[in-house]
Amino acid sequence: MYLILTILLLVTQVYNWTTTGDRNKNINFDIDSTPLQIRTDSVVGTNDVLWVRFIQLNTADYGPGITVFFEDPPVYTIGYCVSRKQFTMPGSNKQNERVWTFSKENNRLKLLCDGEQIFDFNYADSTIQECKNFWGLDFAYIKFQSSNTAKDTASDAYRQSGPSVCKAGQYWSGSECKTCEENTFSGNGASACTKCPADTTSPAGSKSADDCKKGEEDCAKTFTCSGAVTISVSATLAAAVFLATILI
């Protein structure tokens, strides 16, 4: 029993938000196997900076990073690969709370903001050799960076990403939460969507089996639709007239 409780506690803790805390401190994190999520409350135009670097094992301070500048318009950089590229911030520029998801998988670097893609960059195709070399390394740590020229001021908290962050009606694709397709559904924290029972349909983003409904024609034939009155008014009147004729 104790072992089960311990495992459940560890699984829960993995996906809890952790306050960013002190900058320039190596934090154990395997970005090659697990996407990173960062929570910010910075507004476009404040010039706040999100700056996280990825560090190899047994190296004190060696590795590339990604940076988001909350300028107007906002700008991102990919260390050794892309320098100051403008992008459109999802939602309103006045919005402050956002969740950023960064992943490194199959030679691709991806950054999402509130589920919307900011970049999808294949570093293996870069013409810059340093870009290929640095991002081709295996990383053991992350570091929220501070230096004489810039400082991470936007990152409030971080966590590993995974199925537990997906809401009902979504599933974990391996790097992000995606909406369940039509005729499927999911609850919170799903790694896959469940198909609706045979002869039922549901809209995209359905959250439970209750969203899987039979068509109106099937309802009329089988009388199985929840809450549906399948006997028509005309049929009821016809039956009443027939009964009255017999009684007379």
Image (cartoon, helix red, strand yellow):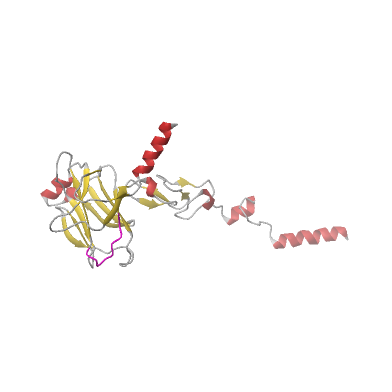
Instruction: Assign the C terminus to one quadrant of the image.
Output: bottom right
Question: Seen from this angle, which residue lies furthest front?
Answer: 22
Locate residue 116: give its quadrant.
bottom left
| Observer-nearest of 156 and 140 | 156
Whether residue 196 is situated above or below residue 246 in the rendered picture: above
Where in the figure is residue 31, as x and y percent of width and height?
25, 44
Q: Is residue 207 left or right of residue 29?
A: right
| Observer-nearest of 136 and 29 | 29
| Observer-nearest of 182 and 247 | 182
Question: Seen from this angle, which residue lies furthest right?
Answer: 248
Whether residue 228 is situated above or below residue 13 in the rendered picture: below
What's the magenta bit mostly, secondary-structure-wise?
loop
Residue visible at 15% across and 38% down? 58
Residue 40 is covered by the magenta coloring: yes
Instruction: Assign the N terminus to one quadrant of the image.
Output: top left
Whether residue 9 is situated above or below residue 200 in the rendered picture: above
| Observer-nearest of 80 and 7 | 7
Where in the figure is residue 137, as x and y percent of width and height?
17, 42
Q: Is residue 31 left or right of residue 236?
A: left
Q: Is residue 152 left or right of residue 190?
A: left
Where in the figure is residue 210, as x and y percent of width and height?
54, 51
Residue visible at 15% across and 51% down? 126
Question: Seen from this angle, which residue lies furthest left?
Answer: 129
Residue visible at 52% across and 52% down? 211
Where in the figure is residue 73, as x and y percent of width and height?
23, 67
Q: Which portion, as a residue range, is magenta?
A: 39-47
